[in-house]
Amino acid sequence: MRLASIDILRAVTMVLMIWVNDFWTLSNVPKWLTHATANEDYLGFSDVIFPLFLFIVGLSIPFAIKNRMDKGKSKSSIAVHILIRSFSLLLIGFYLMNYEVAFDEGILIGKDFWTILMTLAIVLVWVDWEKTSTAKKYHPHFRAIGAALLIFLAIIYKGGATGEDWMHVHWWGILGLIGWAYLSNSLIFLYSKGNLIIILLLWILFNTLCVLFQQGIVEGPDGFLRYFSVLFQGTIPAFTSAGVLTTLLFQKYSATRLNSAYLVLAFLGIVNIALGLITRPMWGISKLQGTPSWLAICTGIGVLAFILFHYLADVKKKTKWATFISPAGTATLTCYMIPYMVYPIRSLLGFRLPDIFNNGYAGLLVSFVFALLVAAFTGWMERRGYKLKL
């Protein structure tokens, strides 16, 4: 069973993510829309978007794994699929993260061309070529060219303030963080056979690690284990565990009465928000610091958002309003990658709208239209079979 509400919620979240990611091109953006600074006790609208996406990843895991099992896939083959998908997210995230700190003057072809080729390479490797109209004999060659491009881009890369750095893990990037959250939660869900108690304990564990890390009781690991620090800190995978838990609770209680499921989930959402507000004086609300209060409040928002979208989309069947942006929910990675082609092309062409369209509310409107156009272009590509698939 596939819930329309999850696809629509994912589409809305992705469009909003593209929108807020475009704020760097604008000036005079209202403070309530922007990210809070590192030392600020504040929850901006932008600070809610990524946690919501992580939560949606968790919502989807039980359905995705059950779908594969229903097709007769073995547990080991599903585990291999999870590992490959997670590695792909980590690798793409690694490149995107290093793009952020690339040193333009030090790169042989310049940062903009480097980014265009990076995006092209990702397309060549991860497009589901079997769904396109291209001849099957070319598919391995496309992927080989993409892999060779990624290697070439790594060789010529220069990063840091003066180009002194080569590619390395500063952090894992948005997609990399999703990769770690997906990997840990999917494997545990798979091998626990979706046991509600185990998933509940996993969610509690990640929340506890978040608190212990905030208190300084648990510190980030050194050496090789530092690459797994996302899991040790708990915050990021906790959002995804909350999504898995929400789906399991919904399935358990909606089997007898839908209102019961809504009540249980509403209680979970409200308690999380209340807990975040109560503990705010202890840690503050901070995305950049990954505080437990931020985790709790955004988790609560995710649960309540699921109830709202499920009622609208799956109960009342109000889905036509989301038709235009629906590709952002079904071809999400494709949608996410499109701006990485648009921005460098725009930079190379020296294209910029008049200042009035890059400022204040007019700029926000133009930026939102850009996000909608990205979703529309994603749909155009998807209809022709060009969709990134991990």
Image (cartoon, rainbow, N blue to C red):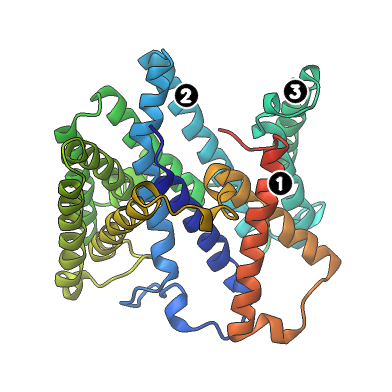
Q: What amino acid is at disc 2?
A: His
Name the one closer to the observer, 6 or 115.
6
- The C terminus lies in which quarter of the figure? top right
Q: Which residue is mark 1?
A: 380
Residue at (25% x, 23% y) in the render: 193
Q: Would you place residue 76 above or below residue 209 in this image?
A: above
Name the one closer to the observer, 236 or 256.
256
Q: What amino acid is at disc 1?
A: Trp
Q: CA distance from mark 2 to mark 3?
A: 20 Å
Residue 77 point in image, percent of width and height: 43, 16
User: Circle 2 — which element?
Assistant: helix
User: Circle 3 — which element?
Assistant: helix
Residue 26 point in image, percent of width and height: 63, 78
Disc ID at residue 81 = 2
Q: Which residue is mark 3?
A: 139
Whichever of labels 2 and 1 marks the residue nearer the N terminus, that label is: 2
- The N terminus lies in which quarter of the figure? top left
User: Circle 1 — which element?
Assistant: helix
Q: CA distance from mark 2 to mark 1?
A: 27 Å
Q: Quadrant of residue 357?
A: bottom right
Q: CA distance from mark 3 to mark 1?
A: 21 Å
Residue 373 point in image, percent of width and height: 67, 60
Q: Residues within 10 Å of mark 1 (few under 14, many from 20)?
A: few
Whichever of labels 2 and 3 marks the residue nearer the N terminus, that label is: 2
Q: Would you place residue 222 above or below residue 128 in this image?
A: below
Name the one closer to the observer, 82 or 40.
82
Res 223 visible: no
Q: Residues within 10 Å of mark 3 (few under 14, many from 20)?
A: some
Left or right of 209 in this view: 335: right
